Image: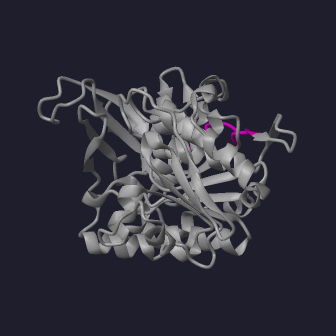
Amino acid sequence: MALRAASPPCAAGRCLPSSATPRVCGRRAFRSLASAAPAPQRASAVRTKAINSDGAPGTSDSPQVVCFGELLIDFVPTVSGVSLADAPAFKKAPGGAPANVAVGIARLGGSSAFIGKVGDDEFGYMLSDMLKENNVNNQGLLFDTHARTALAFVTLRSDGEREFMFYRNPSADMLLEEKELDLDLIRKAKIFHHGSISLITEPCKTAHIAASKAAKDAGVLISYDPNLRLPLWSSADDARDGILSIWDTADLIKVSAEEISFLTNGEDPYDDSVVEKLIHPNTKLLLVTEGPDGCRYYSKEFSGKVGGLKVTAVDTTGAGDAFVAGILSKLAVDFSILQDEARLREALKFANICGALTVTERGAIPAMPTPQQVADALANVVA
């Protein structure tokens, strides 16, 4: 697969070496290289913020949380409650669940990186720039010259819930290969976060499994959010089997009530005995999100519920990702939260606020909250 690195910027766009034979895409010229190379940096590697043990911002070349998976463009209707065909216009927004989490962590002052692939196109460069602008380490991002950046059109019902139509036949994220992984970046992390979308097709499925194994072998905590998108799978059975195929490798799992019902073939997701069936011997924490009602938590030592913040939903895209970013940003500072129920509840209260604030704006990444926004909203949470 021919890949290329982002060329340095110049007055007329991105410059090409004089020996390159360009192929024109829109108003930009691109060239193909014979081998894969980390693509996003135009100059030096991104230096990301870290959180020191005292909670103060610091700097680190090794991000604490590495997010693996898809990075794409969401097109969201400018009005709610209409079909795609009836939408008068769409707002373009960067998205993709693992990328949302990476940006969410960085925006909260944490240290994160993203590993994945985008197309060698205008959208791919926009997304690479977006990661860098949001202080996410993007040295593990590659560009593919043979496939476009994935697109998702997201319809918003009047209640803010979503319906998806994807353009990825295939898209660049599906073509990431194991040999292209930045395993050093993964092994140096404290947390490796991933979903299930990358398990759908090869070669990305093999790359995904290899990345997760590298993290596990290095003692990195594995965070898993299945992020069910049924239209992308060949069948419901394939989706269920695929999601559960790596379930036992995760230390922390976040699922929605709807996903529990799906994974258990329609059983009651609010029944603790049903949820407990999904806890495996390696599970350190299982989290069930319930939208405005907050979340439930289950570990081997304790379980309970933390209330959420009621807000007017404009767009629920990215709410679960913001929640994950909130809890991972806390765990990256101190894993001992997992053994202290009182501190865990405080961290989950924080995560619930992150999710709630995200639904008050259109688009996932643009709506990810800052620490000050979360602090301002905390007083309204019902514990």
Q: Is residue 246 visible?
A: no
Looking at the image, residue 148 lies above or below residue 159: below
Q: Is residue 187 magenta?
A: no
Q: Position of residue 330 (x, y in %)?
A: 71, 46
Residue at (59% x, 56% y) in the render: 304
In-image side of 209 versus 172 (left or right): right
Q: Quadrant of the C terminus?
A: top right
Residue at (28% x, 65% y) in the render: 233
Q: Position of residue 131 (x, y in %)?
A: 56, 38
**Residue ranking furthest to the top:** 11
Please tell me which residue lies in front, 248 or 35. 248
**Residue ranking furthest to the bottom:** 281
In-image side of 47 versus 248 (left or right): right
Looking at the image, residue 167 lies above or below residue 236: above
Magenta part of the protein: which range?
Answer: 39-49
In-image side of 100 versus 283 (left or right): left
Q: Is residue 12 visible?
A: yes
Display coloring: one colour
Residue at (43% x, 63% y) in the render: 196
Q: Quadrant of the N terminus?
A: bottom left
Please tell me which residue lies in front, 140 or 215. 215
Residue at (63% x, 29% y) in the render: 378
Please tell me which residue lies in front, 253 or 278. 278
Principal SS element in the magenta part? loop
